[in-house]
Image (cartoon, rainbow, N blue to C red):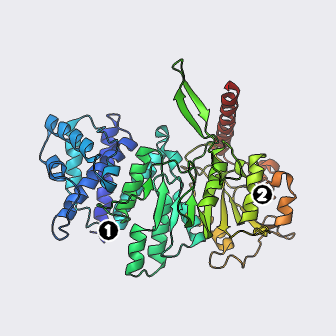
Amino acid sequence: MSNNNTSTSSIVSKVWAFCNTLRDDGVGYGDYLEQLTYLLFLKMADEYSKPPHSRKMPIPAAYNWETITNKSGDELEVHYNHVLRELAKERGILGQIFTKSQNKITDPAKLYKLIALINAEQWVLMGVKDKGDIYEGLLEKNAEDTKSGAGQYFTPRPLIKAMVECLRPEPMRTIADPACGTGGFFLAAYDWLTDNVELDKEQKQFLKYKTFAGNEIVAGTRRLALMNLFLHNIGDMDSEQVMISPNDSLIAASETRYDYILANPPFGKKSSMTFTNEEGEQEKEDLTYNRQDFWVTTSNKQLNFVQHIKSMLKTTGLAAVVLPDNVLFEGGAGETIRKKLLETTELHTILRLPTGIFYANGVKANVLFFDGKPASKDPWTKEIWVYDYRTNIHHTLKKNPLKLEDLQDFITCYNPKNRHKRKETFSEANPEGRWRKFTYDEIIARDKTSLDITWLKDKSLADLDNLPDPDELAQDIVENLEAGLESFRAIIASLKK
């Protein structure tokens, strides 16, 4: 099955075609993906329980796959609801996949058809890559569905791959993501290790059961992440230990330190909690985390994630984190955190990202690469290399999406095999060079120790003959307006206090 691509692609198109049927009934991608997750899990457990595997599965006989396939109509609907409710009470990954599960397919005939569709295939035999690709494809479609808001949990896969290529994770090391969304960083690291390293039996076991640790507080997203890992052969059906915790990672210091941290913490500056006041109105209260190990107390979520990620990193660990521009220039707590980061870690690389690559609109972001270090009286950061992949770059999600080859020049400049041997492409002779180094002293001398550094000329301002397409200009205007609106909302919220 795994070498027969035609059948995989025909399954993908079947799975997709059916999703479109359900959309007419108002079942969105997210809801469809969720039902698919429950049913796939049960079907694969059923396959594992039969020869040649003949494994003992944790699913009680009264709620297994066969009990679903031999019913139809109202009887099926009632039984399926019962299955979802009961399996949520089970232990380990099984219970976690079914936590708070609900049937969103109200038409029993359509549910029956979806079950038949899944029943027609042997999923366990299918190559890991194929199953994974089907599911990743669904996740991406779900992210594109702007109404669902799922885009905020989805980092562009080419960006993730480039970050993993720069870090070059090694076997028998741990990898964490404190805001893991649907698990994109884990899967890219998993693929990188299986594609680039000859793993022995012990290393394969470690990769499957002990490498990854994440947090995801949104229940539905976490469910998709668990299933995504499982379909990629990470963890197991009967795993007691669940790799992705539902806890807010910022609340307490991590008990474990990790070798690698790859993350794209949620955008949106404020950490807040919604509660109902005495008048019965919904109010938001800023969350400031009381962490003794933080350098500063702030309600800015991203600045908290920077501090938290630093605290999770081993002194030999490597981190690559996607962060919005405000982290690079914001005063007050931001400045303190930047100074501390330069002192206590080696912050060696910043990749400036273009707009138009995230499903969340109007986001200007960067990747910060920093290495954990032991305590020292002198600052660890000696120089920062900046790659500007923003100025004069235009990407849009539909017409010109970000591809891995777009970031290839950055990866080459980063020089992952030995990042201590790097060559600037910027010089007096080549002022257009996108790769430039700055010393610690140059950075510290900047106002507020700002890391928001640009030197390239914006061509669109100078060259009126070379203006981008009207739709690109319009998109830029929309993004700037949306970013402005976000700032205004934050101001209004703080004035209400």
Query: Which residue is pictured at 75% across the width and 56% down the height?
Result: 338
- Left or right, 248 with reference to 302: left
Can I make out residue 159 in this image? no
Residue 195: quadrant of the picture: bottom left
Chain-order first, disc 2 or disc 1: 1
Circle 1 residue: 127
Q: Percent x, y for residue 224?
A: 40, 51
Mark 2 packing: few (<14 Cα in 10 Å), some, or many (20+)?
some
Find residue 336 and name its label: none
Q: Percent x, y for residue 4?
A: 29, 69
Q: Which residue extends farthest front? A: 292
Q: Quadrant of the C terminus?
A: top right
Q: Percent x, y for residue 334?
A: 74, 49
Identify residue type, mark 2. Lys
| Vertical comparison of 78 with 161: above or below | above
Q: Quadrant of the N terminus?
A: bottom left
Circle 2 residue: 339
> In the rendered picture of this protein, how many numbered marks are placed on residues?
2
